[in-house]
Image (cartoon, helix red, strand yellow):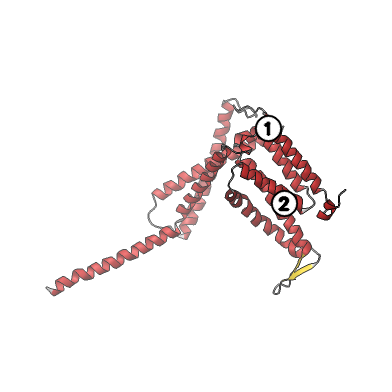
Amino acid sequence: MDARFHRPKTQIKVIDNASRTNKFASKSRRKRGSFVERTLATLVSKTESALFAEQLAQADGFLQKLDPRVKIVGLLALILAATLARNIFTILFVFAVAVLLAVLSRVPIRTLATRAWLSALFFTGMIALPAIFLTTGDALLRLPLLDWTITAQGLTSAFYLISRVETTVTLSLLLVLCTLWTHVLKALRVLRVPVVFVVILGMTYRYIFVMLETAQNMFEARQSRLVGALGASESRRIAAASVGVLLSKSFYLNSEVYLAMQSRGFRGEVYTLDEFKMQRRDWFALTGFLSISLFAFWLGRQDSLATLLNFN
């Protein structure tokens, strides 16, 4: 009787320990995620970002209400003013104007930080980093282990480069976020941009979403048939096979889309149903953009702040 009563308890303990081990393993797998799950999450996040940009372009903001031609001309003039500036104060002034436009257009500062500022700071910082040590000038600091000298002129040139890139990327992102892509393409054609360039931009933009949707469907199909976690070699094999399948599908889709466009009368020009019409606020905004750009261009011609303050 005692033995019979003790056996179930032992079995219960063994089963309980096994279930705890399985729960811990499943939690760790869910926490880490497989290759397919991570890829699906990335594809979904990119699609959501594109949808957010479309919704933001239709918001009730300052830039959203303007004619796309005004936005292209005005923001391009500000970009040129920041690019040609000789002093840092002009670049910071244009950057402040860009941030003000973002606030008036209801563009979240967090969106600018994640999509423009951090990425531009990282890549431009990697490019500008050697200039800190290679530019000759007044020594500020010497690294103890590497014996590299940081010069004032190197820091100044690196700061100039990073600030210019941050300003121009912010203005470019504002144009994309606050304007529908079809309106951007049509405005480029109105401004006499070559049709080949506009068509390539339009097709590239559409192909990105088609490829994202195709890749998402492929990995969802793979995930629905997947049992257990994938190893490193299996993940690499699936990634290589997926790249090959996407490449073959892109070639096939390329020919199919071209034939479909030819059969519908495409002869090189892209037409949209939206018609642009300049209103009073567009003329005022264009005047304001050009005035600020001309002021920034004049301000950027000054070699330094002392020259600007001593200007008569």
Asked if one can make out residue 134 in the rendered structure from this viewpoint, the answer is yes
Q: Residue furthest left?
A: 1
Q: Which one is earlier in the sequence, the residue at label 1 or at label 2?
A: 2
Q: Nearer the viewer, residue 299 or 18?
A: 299
281 is higher (above) or lower (below) than 170: above
Q: Looking at numbered disc 2 in the image, what kind of residue is underneath it?
A: Leu
Whether tag 1 and tag 2 are in contact, CB under 8 A, the answer is no
On screen, residue 63 versus residue 240, left or right, reads right
Q: Secondary structure at mark 1?
A: helix
Task: Using the rendered view, name the quadrant where residue 80 is placed.
Answer: top right
Q: Position of residue 67 (x, y in %)?
A: 65, 33
Q: Nearer the viewer, residue 83 or 224?
A: 83
**Residue 92, which numbered label?**
2
Give the residue at x 75% y 42%.
293
258 is higher (above) or lower (below) than 29: above
On screen, residue 289 versus residue 1, left or right, reads right
Provide the residue designation for mark 1.
282
Q: Nearer the viewer, residue 256 or 29?
A: 29
232 is higher (above) or lower (below) than 79: below
On screen, residue 246 versus residue 8, left or right, reads right
Q: Position of residue 76 (x, y in %)?
A: 71, 41
Q: Secondary structure at mark 2?
A: helix
Give the residue at x 37% y 54%.
227
Q: Position of residue 103 (x, y in %)?
A: 62, 45
Q: Residue furthest right?
A: 312
Q: Nearer the viewer, residue 306 or 240?
A: 306
**Quadrant location of the N terminus in the rendered image:** bottom left
